[in-house]
Image: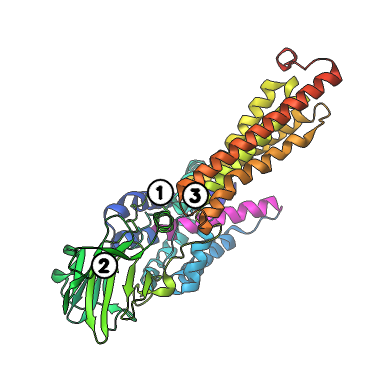
Amino acid sequence: MSGAQAAWLGHPVTVAAIGVLIVNDLVLKPAWPGVVTGKLSDVAGMLVAPPLLALFVAYAARIARRVPPGGRTAAGAIALTGVLFAWMKTTGTGAEAATRAWAVLVPSSWVVADPTDLLALPALAVAWLVWRRAALPPRRDAARARALVVLPAAVFAVTATSAVPPAPSAHAVEVRDGEIVVAVPDWFTIASADGGRSWHEWKGSRSRSPSSAPATRACVPSDPGRCYRVVPNRLRVEQTSDGGATWTAAWEISRGRQGWLDRVYENPDPLGERSGAAASQAVAVQEVPGGHVVAVANGTDGVVLRDVSGRWRRLGFSEPGPEGARLSESAAAPLASPGKRIGPELGAAVLVALAALLAALGTTEGPRRWPVRFGICAGVLWTSVLLVVTAEGTGGLIALLLFVPMFAAGTAGVLAVWLRSRPRGTRLLLAAPAAFAAVFLPFLGWSLGVPGDYAVAVLLALLLCAVVLVVAVRAAVRARARGTREHGRPIRGAAKE
């Protein structure tokens, strides 16, 4: 660890900034979101990022057997921090690039361009003063010792982020002063004066916002017998033309695809507030020349509109921009997306396939000679993959750090035992890709809409896994019987271990 850069990271001012960054992002921001807590993280980050970056640069230079001058490394780290911070806070491209880069460590991270955050840049001058003080030889040794303890906390601090907000949810809709007004609590209230073709911020009084009393039934003003209503907990709208004597479906999305949409709008941050349901919550009817328009608030799925011709179209929430979020047909989430939103199922398929592979290897001669060694190594290998598959949020970095040595040790141990005696009959290894396909393909089909119901996909995965298991067991029994005929008797691993 480079002495000067480590001393900078271990300086009391940097240590204090690390503490502020952790407490502010994980405690203060969720409790008191606002300008103060937002800018506090930026200021603390300006004090923590440069010494951390300088330390990594110095360490890399040391590995390459090149020792850069300490002052130049510090100045370069401070300058690079300022340039990157300004780029991601003043441009949409920079914010998107920062979000994608940060997602490697924190999948739920979200960087938003906000030029007012540049007020934190003067803190870089304080970081330079701290560097000058920390680089003095009398202070260096103690600071280096502190850096050994502080480094994990510093890495955690810069990767820890405040909770990602839940997806916007259309809670209520009404017709006010000739406009369709949609209320999205905690986000915005917007209105349309042209039947939903364009939207703008609603300028009405907040005290008269439609969010307080959503209407679940509405009728055509000139024809009170023609009404529409929403079905609770469903993306479904029913209509009647006889005053409510009979009701028929006017528009709906199946239960299976509704469950898909709930996953689409799920908050990716495990520490964040849960997103609302994709379900019809309120309806409004506006009479216009040539007929009437129906608007339905569908929670996280946005709004569905019926035009005068009777055509229904879904409007989703567009990405936040300089003028705020809007509704558009192009932003509506697709009801099928091949291979998307099935990350947990993909992880489960990998774990099942790995278990099948290890079980197949366990039937060969080497693992049967040394079952305890093989079992321990196989358990370490499988657990390492489990850590990565189930890791979320900031725990992903810890899981990655544990995964590398565990996976390497487990793989080396499994191969060492398996190759100890010349392995033959590797046909059983086909159980691994078969098990992967058995689990993954039903959920891949679910992402395509066939089957449409998630429960059916689960049932198909279980049935296919059962088929693979039966075939693999029969093949293993035959292989063992064949080995017994060739060698005279089966090998008893416990006696050899």
The residue shown at (22%, 74%) is: 285
Marks 2 and 3, the one that precedes in the sequence: 3
Q: Give the range drawn in magenta.
A: 44-65
Residue flagged by tag 3: what amino acid is it?
Answer: Val
Rendered position, 174 above or below 471: below
Nearer-N-terminus badge (1/2): 2
Where does residue 21 sit, x and y in percent of width and height? 39, 53
Task: Report the mark closest to the observer, 1 or 2.
Answer: 2
Give the number of the mark in front: 3 or 1. Answer: 1
Which residue is disc 2 drawn over? 239
Q: How far apart are marks 1 and 2 (CA)?
A: 39 Å
Q: Find the distance from the CA under tag 3 to the CA under tag 1.
A: 20 Å
Q: Can residue 35 be seen in the rendering of this structure? A: no
Alpha carbon separation for disc pair 2 and 3: 57 Å
Closest to the observer: 279 or 274? 279
Q: What residue type is labelled 1?
A: Pro
Residue marked by disc 3: 155
Across the whole image, how many numbered discs are drawn on residues?
3
Q: Is residue 234 on the magenta stretch?
A: no
Q: Are marks 3 and 1 in contact (CB under 8 Å)?
A: no
Q: In this view, does 86 lie to the left or right of 282?
A: right
Q: Is residue 130 above or below residue 219?
A: above
Residue 100 position (above or below residue 143): below
Q: Which residue corresponds to mark 1? A: 270
